[in-house]
Image (tube, grey):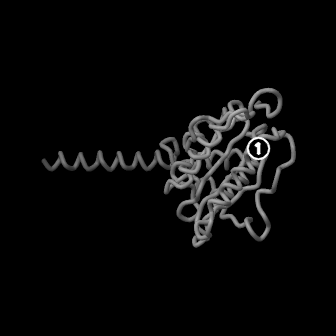
Amino acid sequence: MAAANGSKALRVLVVYGSESGNAEHAAQKLVATWAAKKGTNVTVDPEAICGGDAAKRFDSLKDDYDVLIVLTSSFGEGEAPSNYEKFLLMLAKGAKAESPPLKGLQHAVLGFGDSSYETFMNCPRLTDKFLEECGSRRIHKRFEIDASEQDTRALEEQWKEGVWQALQSRPEPQGAQAAPWCEEGKTDKIYPKSLSELGEGYGHGNPVVQLLLLLVALAGAAAAYYHFSDA
C-alpha cells in the first residue's frame, strides 16, 4: 500500500474527464506547473491521463500512487465524459465492494461545467463521493468551476494552490477527510446512476449483448438461406 509519509516523495497521478477539452487542458497545465517546481516532496507523473486509461490501471492505483488529482466535467444528463465513463464505473463498483479498493490513497477533485444545465456537476460530485467510499481520503475540498460565473480562473488557481499546499504538508491517508464531499443545500444535489446506466454490462461478454448478437447472426443466416433458395 502506498505510504504518504517518510522520506519518499508523494507519487501523484492527474486524471481527467473531458468532452470539450477544458478539463483536459487544465489537467495538462497542472501537471506542467507542478512538475516544474523544484525542491518539493511531490513527484507528479509527467502526463495527465484520461479516466479510460486510469480504469485500465484501477487495481494497481493504490500501489503505484499516493494521491489522485481528478479534473472532470459532466456530459449530457449528468453523464461522464466518454473518455472518463469507464473510470466512473470502476469507482461506482468499488464503492459497493466489501473491501475498499482504494484504501490508502488520497484525492482531490476539481469539477467543470455550466450551471445553466441542472446536472452540470453530477460527474465531479459522484467522483468525489465514490472515491471516499472506495477508501480514499480527501485532502482538499472539491471546487466547482462554473462557466456561467465570471473570473473562474481565480477560483481554479485557488484550488490548485490549496491542493499543492495540502500535498506539501504530507497528509496521512488514515486521517479524517479534509472536507465533506458535499455542502448541504449547495453541492449535495446529485443524480445517481445505476451500474447499467454507468456502462456496466455493455461489453460483448454481457448475456443480453450476446443474445442480440446471436439473433443478428441468425437473421443474417436466414436472409442468406432465402437468397440462395430463390437463386
Q: Residue at x 72, y 32 (%)?
A: 39
Can you give x and y, in whole percent of width and height, for residue 186 in the image? 75, 69
Residue position for label 1 = 136
Q: Is residue 19 above or below residue 119?
A: above
Q: Residue at x 59, y 63 (%)?
A: 113
Camera-side residue of 207 and 77: 77
Q: Is residue 198 left or right of residue 63?
A: left
Can you give x and y, in whole percent of width and height, for residue 27 in the image? 59, 47
Describe the element under mark 1 as helix, strand or loop: loop
Camera-side residue of 65 and 211: 65
Q: Is residue 19 above or below residue 186?
A: above
Camera-side residue of 154 and 178: 154
User: Which residue occupies the extreme front position in the image?
Assistant: 38
Q: Quadrant of residue 40?
A: top right
Q: Residue at x 24, y 46 (%)?
A: 224
Please identify the quadrant where the N terminus is shown.
top right
